[in-house]
Image (cartoon, rainbow, N blue to C red):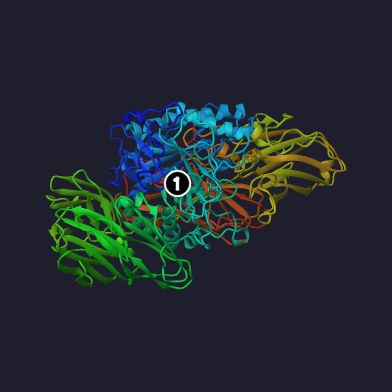
Amino acid sequence: MGLSRRTFGALAGSTALGLTLGGSGEPSAAAASAPTGPPPKAPAADGRTHTVGFDRYSMLVDGRRVVLWSGEMHPFRLPSPSLWRDVLHKLRAHGYNTVSVYVSWNYHSPAPGSYDFTGVRDLDLFLRTAAETGLYVTLRPGPYINAEVDAGGFPGWLTATPGTARTADPDYLRHADEWLTAVNRIAVRHLYTRGTGTVVLYQLENEYADHVTEPTGRAYMAHLYRKVRADGIDVPLFHNDKGRNGHWTPGSFDTGGERGRWLYGFDGYPSPFGTPPDWGHYGPGGPRGGSTASPGTPGLIAEFGGGWFDPWGGAEFGGKGYAESRRTRDAAYERRFYLTNLANGITVHNVYMTFGGTSWGWLPAPVVYTSYDYGAAIDEARQPTAKLVPMHQIGHLLHSFPDLAKLDRAPDIDAGAPDVKAYHLVNPDTGAHIQVLRNDGSADTVAAVPLAGATVSVPLPARDARLLAAGISLGHWTLRHSTAQPMLRLAAGRQDIAVFTGRTDELTETALECPHQPAVTVLEGTADCTHRDGALYVRARLGSLTRISVHGGGPAAPLLLLLADDAASQRLWHRPTPSGPVLVHGPALLRTAELRGATAELTGDTVGEADLEVWAPRGVTEAAWNGTRLRMGPTRSGSLRAEGRLPGAGAVELPALTGWRRSAENPESAADFDDSAWRTAELTASAATTPVPAGSPVLFADDYGFHYGDVWYRGRFESAGGAGSVSLSYVTGTQGLLMAWLDGRPLGTHRMPVPDRGTVRRATWTATAEFPLPSAAGSGGHVLSVLVRRMQHDQDGRADDTHKAGRGLVQVSFNGASPAVRWRIQGEAAPDPVRGPLNNGGLYGERNGWHLPGFPDQDWRPARFPRAERRQGVVWYRTGFRLAVDPATDASIGLTLTDEPSRAYRVQIFLNGWNMGQYINDVGPQHTFVLPNGLLRTRGDNTLALAVLSDGTTDSGPGVVELTLLGRALGGVPVTRVESPGPTSPRT
Ligand code: IPT
């Protein structure tokens, strides 16, 4: 049946294969489905050309099947390029073979025609590092990305341009093409097809669901397709269908006559409390069936929930903190949902997010605060969590057992337990049977399933799942069945090694084909081994690492059977080398393994002290760890074991933060402030979707070229005689606010109300502040000063230009008078050439470099924390601190702010001039801000600057401000300092 199945050819880099496209655009010969064979080698920029194609089962790299087991991370959420390698190492070591990345247009483009890919924006370096790490890359440069970033990734300047975004409007397409040209110029240098990088997939647009049936939507996607191909991107392209609606399937839009190089993909964020949906090839089908919409392409999930983002505020606003996302989408969630995906024929599987990182500066969209930890498997501080365990086990499984890349649905089986759903699949080439058993009930149970002619009992904890296999090859040995989940197989030296996993204390049975009685030695742990019916049956209760050595009995090589519980499996590291695979057991992380002569040169991390054991190809008798030669001795397991233990990480001392200096701000509120260099608000037409009230000048900041952070207004008028109050209507993102002064005297602060969830659309976040006016406003000349913390632009998820909702003042009117007001406006200064356009807003201190290292603050007054002062406006605090972390230690350090929660103030945090995010004391929930090494000088001097904006309605802090240790390991990657220049010529 596999042979008659039609494939869609889908051979990118087709010249390398000599395949030509027929006049219809279809591949001229429909190839038979590729057989199951060994997976391709770990990818590298190896200078050879490669083919990247697919059939209905899986991706085919150089004609070999590979399941892309992918994790999402965003380079722009980790502003320290050295640390990209750390996260990529962790992905690869834990079994991922692919990294999926958005590229955020706004991060790279301060102005039309201006594109910056240097420093923290060095996409080329990221893609090089991914290739050096041996990971495939899925590139997702938009133009629109959503991603909980400002304007969904659109640059601030795009909000002030005509043309409906995400349509075929020529004004928009001109800008989008400019972006794609810039990003593709780098991307083409990293295509796997060319052998100069490891990019194998490329996504067009993002969850484009709203103009799908309209000509403009179809023309837009067709335009993007042609543009990306014209730019030289020759790997398969796809789109991520938001609702599994069958949008943008192959052939459904104009791909310029080219067929077969377009995949259907979709996203899914199912509730962790429901039953995992069947969204692959084998589900119920129909419009919401997922891959059933595209039977000729492999199941491709571009994003599947690996956590969830968290909104500002506490539980009353839906925010629960990232510990909660990590708890509800825990390791058992991953097993239940991701194994269900695999059982449905999903062979391109990306977990969004796997490392979430930090939406630093003004990057976060209004829906999120600074941390984008996401409850992901690797936390914001780069620390592995328990969620890596299933990923590690499944990733290694997919790599070791190519059978999983080509599965057909096999006849249903009865799981023998009411709450258990059983999926049964078979590989048509190898005959291997795979079962995924999922317990949807709230009680632990035992399934009884037919597996390889026997009925086996499988313990299934409540709301958990596991994968079972029968008939898979373990090298010279064949598995008859196991109730433990296969994880790994390799040949090391003369022996085969097979690893199976499960939860601690589970009773497992593993049966190995073995015609005759073998010699069996239980080397560690306890196991009951019997030979019957031509198989060796091993029954063992899981605990740490049970080791069984099997010799003879038929197969031509001995087998080391390792039964690992979760903790032990997480200490097993598999690395390919040109001379054969290496398996390491013991340390907290294996980063690299190279064989040099008789020595296995290993690098990695330890947290506590650790043992080191190595299985390596024949001839390897020595090992070195992080450059230190170890005394190794042979073991009965066929490995080498270090005689001593590897050292763990030492203590990390963090200094108290003292020596603060204080300077109060906002001269802009004073009557006599010189605003002559500010822009006059004279525009009468705006690009914003928020209407400009008749008779008012345009006051939206974006129209005047100010796109991020705070914006100031100064309005001069002669007299407002008779006016009892002034009304200021304004528009911001969530948690915006407005404060006003008349002639330097505070009128009050107004905070954008937080609507009940679901009742108010984001784009209508407009409110009106009304402040009583003093009678003095009645005569003489006056200045009304207004500061708007406008937060960020909305995303444009529905392709209706919501990113163009106005930001800033809408209109100001006096109640009882109508003086003519002449407005001037000032936002951020020219973008910081190193830190980028999203680093700064328009506070006086920011415009004058108060946040920068080296700013002369010696005249500022000393201050101590906690503080309690009542003042409307902005006050800055600066201090320096010195760190002396041991250079071999990777310490992850954060800044934690705490105070009495009713105090109405917020803090913009600058580390060495970099805006690490916003703390809102009376909103929360975030208290700890990650300070990435590289920006943070772990051996040297650092500058902290805090810009405190307080309402004046309560005392304000800061309260306690301290450095906190978020993780430490001995090892890590070399970290290069991120350039952090000080002030040049001050501007006002
Ligand atoms: C989907 C987006 O594609 C992605 O950019 C991100 O916003 C993610 O969700 C949520 O974190 S949007 C989908 C949930 C409707």
In this rendering, position of residue 7 left or right of residue 699: left
The type of residue carrying mark 1 is: Leu
In this rendering, position of residue 21 left or right of residue 947: left
In this rendering, position of residue 665 left or right of residue 857: right
Q: Residue 320 sits in which quadrant? A: bottom right
Beta carbon of the mark 1 residue lies under 8 A of ligand 1: no
Near-viewer residue (917 or 276): 276
Residue 98 image point, x, y percent: 38, 45
Q: Residues within 10 Å of mark 1 (few under 14, many from 20)?
A: many
Near-viewer residue (562 or 473): 473
Q: Residue 235 sits in which quadrant? A: top left
Is 654 placed above or below 245 here?
A: below
- Number of disc labels: 1
Residue 868 image point, x, y percent: 60, 57
Near-viewer residue (736 or 447): 447
Give the residue drawn at x 64%, y 30%: 163
Give the residue drawn at x 32%, y 31%: 17
Is residue 153 visible to us here?
yes
| Image quadrant occupied by the C terminus | top right
Residue 219 image point, x, y percent: 58, 31
Identify the element where label 1 is drawn: strand
Q: Kindly identify which residue carries mark 1.
A: 300
Q: Residue 452 sits in which quadrant? A: bottom left
Give the residue drawn at x 23%, y 73%: 526
Residue 640 image point, x, y percent: 16, 57
Is residue 946 visible to us here?
no
